[in-house]
Amino acid sequence: MTKTQMAERLSEFHLFSDLFPTQIALLTNKTKFLDVSRDAILFNQNKQAHGFYLLLKGQVKLGVESLDGSEKVIRLIQSGQSFGEESIFSDHTFSMYAYTVKDSQALLISKEAILDIIDTDVKLAGRMLSVFSTRNYQLVKDIKSICLQNSTKRITDYLLQINRTFRGSDCFRLPTNKTIIASMLNITPETFSRVMQKLQNAGLITVNGKDIVINNISGLHDFK
Amino acid sequence: MTKTQMAERLSEFHLFSDLFPTQIALLTNKTKFLDVSRDAILFNQNKQAHGFYLLLKGQVKLGVESLDGSEKVIRLIQSGQSFGEESIFSDHTFSMYAYTVKDSQALLISKEAILDIIDTDVKLAGRMLSVFSTRNYQLVKDIKSICLQNSTKRITDYLLQINRTFRGSDCFRLPTNKTIIASMLNITPETFSRVMQKLQNAGLITVNGKDIVINNISGLHDFK
């Protein structure tokens, strides 16, 4: 990827869309293009962060792992989304690992360049605060869902949430495979299949592989 | 509390310790002193935030509640700590409620005043980013603990974490009651009591009401 193309992608990104060309140039000089196949580790838990990532293409899961190798997926990153910002504003290491689920292309934007710009550009700092605030909100929502909602409610909420991102249509495709979705919802893949079957039997959804049609939104919302 | 006392408390607070006297005066004018007895709600889930809180005295739990009234405590606030910042940097409402566990005194610092100062003071924005980053880190750690660790490991980690804040001594007092600690760890109060008894029987800790002595740190760390 050429420097010009990188500069273009960076200036399209919502956090950077108000930056001056000189600031974009500074960022571009401190940004690396990564082209990685699926099943690769972009960063690991407990490693120092040298920057944060903007996914251009592919799919990445962010997760945590216990000593015995059990995994919990925290977030699924789609192209156009960024991740890893949290670790550049404190001395913490990465709290999660990042693993490519599909062949992926990403930009790694150096910590040093971001901190340099933020030092003088309060607008960027404000946008970053808003990003962090939203992440925080989502993490609290996840904890609530894991601790207080049964698996059926977690799944119906998840389907309704994806559906909201496809406005004007009640058909959508699940963004990733069953195992990853189940891990995000902290249930087993078997429970996910079983509940999806139950929702289909109740006439609320129609499932065709990864393609879902919601037949009855309010019914899905109220299903217990 | 007089305006002068409020100004003093605000300038001692780590986020504001580098602000100029004129900035502290601006904040003080937009800050309310709250004196509330225990078992009072400071704010509720899904309400708009008008500011964030600095606890001067007492104890506050931040939690989420499900429709059926089940509770999950997310964070316990001690005097000198702040909370509710996340909701002033986005259009989100509060993701949690805040409830006083003890008679409490707090300062409510208005959103408007903070945003005014941050608009021109990039240093404050940077400190706030660091606060958010740490919160984020802690929430991910909590999700990991809830999803991937058994209740014994959650409790030993919790005890070791409190112990680290009392450097130089292996005696400390539990910061709050059993029900709140159990809710933070997403276990029942009965499980908490049972595991504490097990740790005592193994000679790793000595429990006397809320007072704990750790007799064997590495044993506690490795206990399964």
Image (cartoon, coloured by chain):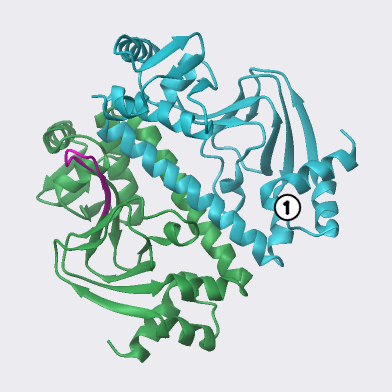
Chain colours: A green, B cyan
The residue at the point 86 percent across, 39 percent down is: B5
Q: Do we see residue A119 in this rendering?
A: yes
Question: Which residue was labeled with disc 1?
Answer: B17
Q: Is residue A66 magenta?
A: yes
Position of residue A82 measured from the top left corner of the image (x, y, whole percent): 37, 64
Magenta-drawn stretch contains A217:
no
On the picture, is A64 further left or further right than A11?
left
- Which of B108/A220 is in front? B108
Between B118 and A32, the residue placed more toward the observer is A32
Instruction: Give the magenta part as a residue range.
Output: A62-71
Residue B97 picture quarter: top right
- Give, as a three-letter code, the residue at label 1: Ser
Callout 1: chain: B
Q: Is residue A178 above or below residue A149?
A: below
Of A59 and B142, the residue lying toward us = B142
At 47% across and 73% down in the image, what residue appears?
A: A112
Residue B206 horizontal/vertical position (percent): 42, 12
